[in-house]
Amino acid sequence: MNPAILAAIGIALIALVALCFGAGDHWFFGLLALASLTGGDAEIYQDHQLSALALLLIGTLLAGVSLRAIYAASRARKGGA
């Protein structure tokens, strides 16, 4: 198995464990974005273009959700929510 795929699976498992231990949404979605981008990288290396595109798009969307969670948490801390 490709080492990048194993890294992506490991990152996703870390995200799940972190969520179980009370990590914030921004950590969870950020780690899932990293796992998706790593998986997309592995798919590009293996010339699976459609699955690589899908994983890269999912990673981009999850990164956006993570940034939104960071913004919401900072507004809640400042009392603006």
Image (cartoon, grey):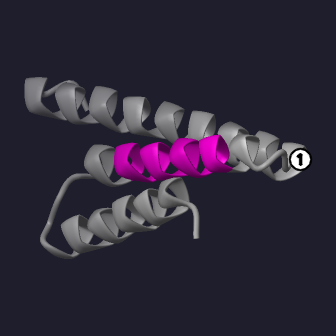
Q: Is residue 62 above or below residue 81?
A: below
Residue that sits furthest to the right in the current view: 50
- Image quadrant of residue 49? top right
Q: Residue at x 25, y 67 (%)?
A: 19
Q: Is residue 43 above or below residue 77?
A: below
Q: Is residue 58 visible?
A: no
- Image quadrant of residue 7? bottom left
- Residue numbers of the magenta segment: 29-42
Q: Residues within 10 Å of mark 1 (few under 14, many from 20)?
A: few
Q: In front: 11, or 67?
A: 11
Indicate the secondary structure of the residue bearing disc 1: helix
Q: Residue at x 52, y 45 (%)?
A: 38
**Residue topped by disc 1:** 50
Residue 67 percent location from the top left of the image: 39, 29
Residue 75 is a magenta residue: no
Q: In front: 9, or 18?
A: 9
Q: Is residue 4 above or below residue 30?
A: below
In this rendering, position of residue 56 left or right of residue 14: right
Residue 46 percent location from the top left of the image: 76, 50
Q: Is residue 77 visible?
A: yes
